[in-house]
Amino acid sequence: MASHPSADITRPRLAFLTPSNPIDADSGGKQFTLDRLLGLATLADVDVFCLEDAPEQLRRLSELLGGRPVHAAGQLKPRTMRHWAESMLRGMPLSVWRNNIAELRALVDRHAGTTYDVVYVDHWLMWPASKGFNPAARRLLNLHNAEHLIFQRAAEAHQGALKYLLSLEAKRVRRYVRRIGVQADAVHSISEADRQELIATGIPASNITAILPCVNAGTASSGRPGGHVLFAGTLTWIPNVEGLDWFLREVLPNLDIAQTVQVVGGPPVPAWLQLPSAAKVEFLGRVPSVEPLYAEAGVMIAPVFSGSGIKIKIVNSLARGLPVVTTSCGIEGFPPGWEGAVRVSDDPAGFRQAVRELINDTTGWATASSQAKQYAARHFSTEAARSKLEECLNVSVRS
């Protein structure tokens, strides 16, 4: 449960607007949202607004926040050609239009008279709904990624009509993010690299603060030398699918280790089950907890070639002392100092060699594990994130 200061201290009142209830944190994005929400709840009285979820999940989130209200309404629109055409007519990127839900806007409108000091817009997708709150409230926009980079990099990996559509969407997203970034009273980015990318779109540098994601400093060490290879990432997220596909096709067939590869995060792409390398893989789907898999893992792999922002699965692994093998895109945005705990390669041979070394070298593994814990504690502490949030809230409330 979120802790609260004594009652005689005046606390700001904050509306936290996010696409999904993050209580089960079954993806990196939801984990980031939940950590940010809990951090804010130590500094303000927070009411949550999100799309519909089961009553039990809404109740659990409310309990975690000390009984604060959790409001929900509306459902995400499906990704269809009709909605894409509507998004073009409305001048919104498709992802934003899919989350621009009449029921959610009506829910927010019903709270227009509530005196909130701050509206914390968690994710660019929620910006249209945020306009229904009292205009006197300060609006802080939390960007999980430099969103246009996701589409831009995806376009670079495709050909033909899909390449054209992704390039078009990247331009639309860039314009939209710039527009709402300028409108917001402040913008929070997930890393300094993303901050620089957002500045390049035209958002004033003075408007953007980089606040790294956080992990509990008391997270227990996990993993062991000689353990299995672990991939943990939501398999509805295209960069994860593309990266794992590359690993299964280009890396794994010639990776001569005895350990299996365990994949968790959703059902596999059917074609993966027909690959010769599938015999070396356990596709575990979604699991109640990843902790038992961390405990028996020797290395976390994070093959990523698109997307942006800090990868939460890498942060989670480092916090547990589990060494990581990733790509240059995967380590993007991480502060310097990760080299002792993370191996980076963009080519199959180099990726194989890095996995092989961490699996087979007991002494090297122990050193990498220790440095992973130290690095995570130094850069991703709850205290550091809370301090920056407190500073940002104080500025917003005084303004």
Image: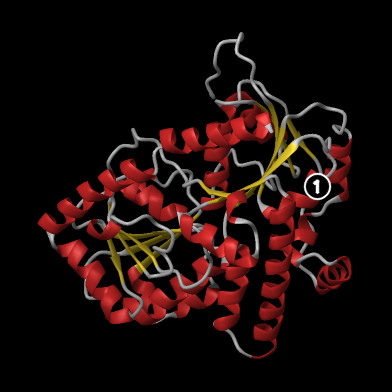
Residue beneath the point at 15% across and 64% down: 360
- Quarter holding residue 262: bottom left
Q: Nearer the viewer, residue 322 or 94?
A: 94
Q: Position of residue 312 (x, y in %)?
A: 46, 52
For the C terminus, which image quadrant? top right
Tell me if 224 is positioned left or right of 324 in this view: left
Tell me if 53 is positioned left or right of 387 in this view: right
Q: Nearer the viewer, residue 80 or 19?
A: 19
Residue beneath the point at 66% across and 35% down: 396
Q: In the figure, 344 relative to 366: above or below?
A: below
Tell me if 103 is positioned left or right of 168 in this view: right
Tell me if 100 is positioned left or right of 391 in this view: right
Q: Nearer the viewer, residue 100 or 75?
A: 100
Three-letter amino acid code at disc 1?
Answer: Ala
The residue wearing badge 1 is: 129
Q: Position of residue 274 (x, y in %)?
A: 46, 79
What is the count of numbered marks? 1
Mark 1 neighbour density, 10 Å: few (under 14) some (14–19) many (20 or more): many
Residue beneath the point at 58% across and 84% down: 158
